[in-house]
Image (spheres, rainbow, N blue to C red):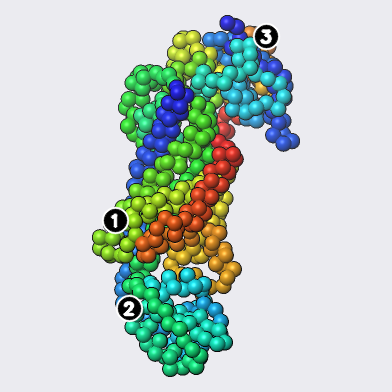
């Protein structure tokens, strides 16, 4: 089996005249947490959508274990979208039951409830969940079929610090299970804690690629946010605050 | 076999979730049942008085006899089968077909108004007369309007319950979430169709049975045939709703489209009043609307004990609408 679970080459995506992603090349190792960083409009979500098979590239390709994306690719990946609505009037239990039945092989719901600490609100209308509870539910729904790759699109945006830490714990646990995680964020601290390797994007292009520690050391700065500020004149934290 | 089993499992899962969502939305659920009952009750009260003291004559073709110049006689035009159908329901009192040499007329043997008009015709007409007779009890307005209200409720429930809801799912990103699973679009669409069909038929059956208990409206035909009309009628509206929703991304635009479809049906399909006597072009438009065929078939079964063959043309139109709607929605659907 290839060391590289996903390989991206010459990836481009345009929407009419707008170029969202402009020629990306990178590889993601099996079992690592890979980060896509950048401010709003950098092309993170579009890149993620192409990695998920949700959008077709305008040019270039995404390869899975050295070949094209297989027909059962959706069975192998789990996605936590940045903003996902749920059906009205359904409880977390109903949602987990629904998503369990969409896959051939699934993790028992009780196990998910325990892992993601959903017990206290499992029978509550999902519209009445707090931001942190909702994100934990969405993550549980993404993992209901025990996927080998998990995509997390800004999973902690809008969460309070405690909920954010809670979610980090869950992500760490997933990492320790050997899953491949692909994460977008504009919180640099989050990237430093969670990611093994990352690319920093700006205007659809790669600015830098490497491990967080290596990038910081090479640039001789204190943290990733300072590094990004030096590169682009923009600060990721401010962007994140506006979004939050 | 495994693929079919997985597909069925996914359809049932989405169907179950949609049913839960609907049943737990108590306001919508209650309103769907309460609204038609309230309308039927209100109309029963408003129209419970004696019928209007006005003679009605239906003219098939030819030269109008002199008696039609008398005040108090309303004249409408209709083709012969339709005119005789109206006479048998006592929706008209006399049917006339005249040319320069002779006048042919029909009366309903149970109609006092018809007997009076017959006397008037004999007294005023110089041309030779040929008499025909039909029989049939008078129908009350409530007998006539109940199928209209059931059909209207079905139309709103099916079109909004699918069209609007699917657009809401799309706008909120829920469809995109489902796209990221092995769920196929035909599985999703099947679940939506079955869920709404069950809801619409159940609501119609409850309202039909419930109002029948205290209004005792006329139902002389086959319940099975009426059920078939209801199934095809609901399916045609549901698939129409799906076709509207298959690519629409804005709830406001979907709202506009759904209104643009339901409003003509509400006015021109004969929900509240018969279009007999309206201009020909209006009747042509009415024939292009699926609700017209639902109501004509339902009334034929409920009021005239029509059989399958008699309502087959209406069923044919409904099947055609279903097929077009289904084809358009499956081909054009976007998550």
Q: Is A128 on the left or on the right of A57, as rendered?
A: left
For label 1, the SS is helix
Marks 3 & 1, CB-CB < 8 Å contact: no
Residue A139, visible in the rendered structure: no
Residue where numbered disc 1 is placed: B209
Question: Where residue A57 appears, x then y in whole percent?
Answer: 67, 26
Question: Where residue B288 appears, x then y in whole percent?
Answer: 55, 59
Question: Where residue A107 appears, x then y in whole percent?
Answer: 39, 18
Residue where numbered disc 2 is placed: B110
Q: Is residue B1 above or below residue B225?
A: above
For label 3, the SS is helix
Marks 3 & 2, CB-CB < 8 Å contact: no
**Disc 3/disc 2 C-alpha distance (Å):** 103 Å
- Ranked by sequence position, the earlier of labels 1 and 2 is 2
**Disc 3/disc 1 C-alpha distance (Å):** 79 Å
Q: Residue furthest left?
A: B213
């Amino acid at each position: 089996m290839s060391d590289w679970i996903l390989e991206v080459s010459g990836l481009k995506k345009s929407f009419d005249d707008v170029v969202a992603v402009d020629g990306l090349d990178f590889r993601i190792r099996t079992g690592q947490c890979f980060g896509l960083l950048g401010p709003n409009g950098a092309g993170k979500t579009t890149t993620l959508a192409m990695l998920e098979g949700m959008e077709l590239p305008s040019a270039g390709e995404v390869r899975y274990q050295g070949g094209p994306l297989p027909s059962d690719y959706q069975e192998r990946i789990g996605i936590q979208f940045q903003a996902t609505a749920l059906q009205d009037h359904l409880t977390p239990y109903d949602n987990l039951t629904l998503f369990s039945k969409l896959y051939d092989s699934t993790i028992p719901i009780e196990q998910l409830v325990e892992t993601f600490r959903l017990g206290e609100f499992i029978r509550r209308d999902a519209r009445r969940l707090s931001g942190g509870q909702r994100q934990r539910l969405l993550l549980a729904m993404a993992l209901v079929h025990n996927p080998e790759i998990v995509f997390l699109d800004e999973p902690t945006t809008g969460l309070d610090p405690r909920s954010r830490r809670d979610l980090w714990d869950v992500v760490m646990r997933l990492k320790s299970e050997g899953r491949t995680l692909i994460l977008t964020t504009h919180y640099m601290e989050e990237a430093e804690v969670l990611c093994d390797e990352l690319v920093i994007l700006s205007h659809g292009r790669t600015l830098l690629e490497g491990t967080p520690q290596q990038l910081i050391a090479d640039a001789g700065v204190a943290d990733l946010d300072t590094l990004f500020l030096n590169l682009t004149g923009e600060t990721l934290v401010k962007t994140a605050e506006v979004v939050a | 076999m495994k693929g079919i089993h997985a597909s069925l499992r996914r359809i049932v899962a989405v169907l179950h979730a949609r049913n839960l969502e609907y049943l737990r939305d108590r306001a919508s659920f209650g309103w769907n049942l309460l609204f038609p009952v309230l309308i039927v009750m209100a109309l029963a009260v408003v129209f419970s008085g004696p019928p209007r003291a006005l003679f009605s004559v239906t003219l098939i073709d030819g030269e109008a006899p002199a008696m039609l110049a008398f005040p108090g006689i309303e004249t409408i035009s209709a083709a012969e089968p339709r005119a005789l159908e109206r006479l048998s329901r006592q929706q008209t009192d006399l049917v006339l077909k005249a040319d320069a040499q002779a006048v042919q007329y029909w009366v309903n043997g149970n109609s006092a108004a018809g007997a009076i008009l017959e006397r008037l015709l004999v007294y005023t007409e110089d041309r030779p007369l040929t008499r025909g007779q039909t029989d049939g009890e008078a129908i009350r307005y409530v007998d006539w309007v109940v199928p209209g209200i059931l059909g209207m409720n079905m139309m709103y429930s099916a079109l909004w319950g699918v069209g609007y809801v699917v657009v809401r799912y799309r706008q909120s990103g829920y469809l995109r979430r489902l796209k990221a699973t092995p769920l196929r679009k035909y599985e999703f669409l099947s679940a939506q169709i079955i869920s709404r069909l069950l809801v619409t038929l159940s609501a119609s059956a409850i309202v039909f049975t419930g109002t029948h208990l205290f209004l005792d409206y006329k139902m002389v035909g086959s319940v099975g045939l009426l059920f078939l009309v209801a199934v095809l009628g609901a399916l045609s509206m549901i698939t129409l709703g799906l076709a509207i929703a298959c690519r629409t991304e804005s709830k406001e635009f979907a709202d506009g489209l759904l209104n643009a479809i339901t409003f003509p049906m509400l006015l021109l399909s004969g929900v509240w009043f018969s279009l007999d006597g309206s201009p020909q072009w209006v009747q042509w438009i009415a024939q292009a609307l699926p609700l017209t065929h639902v109501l004509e078939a339902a009334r034929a079964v409920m009021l005239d004990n029509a059989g399958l063959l008699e309502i087959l043309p209406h069923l044919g139109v409904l099947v055609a609408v279903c097929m077009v709607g289904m084809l358009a929605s499956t081909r054009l659907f976007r998550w």
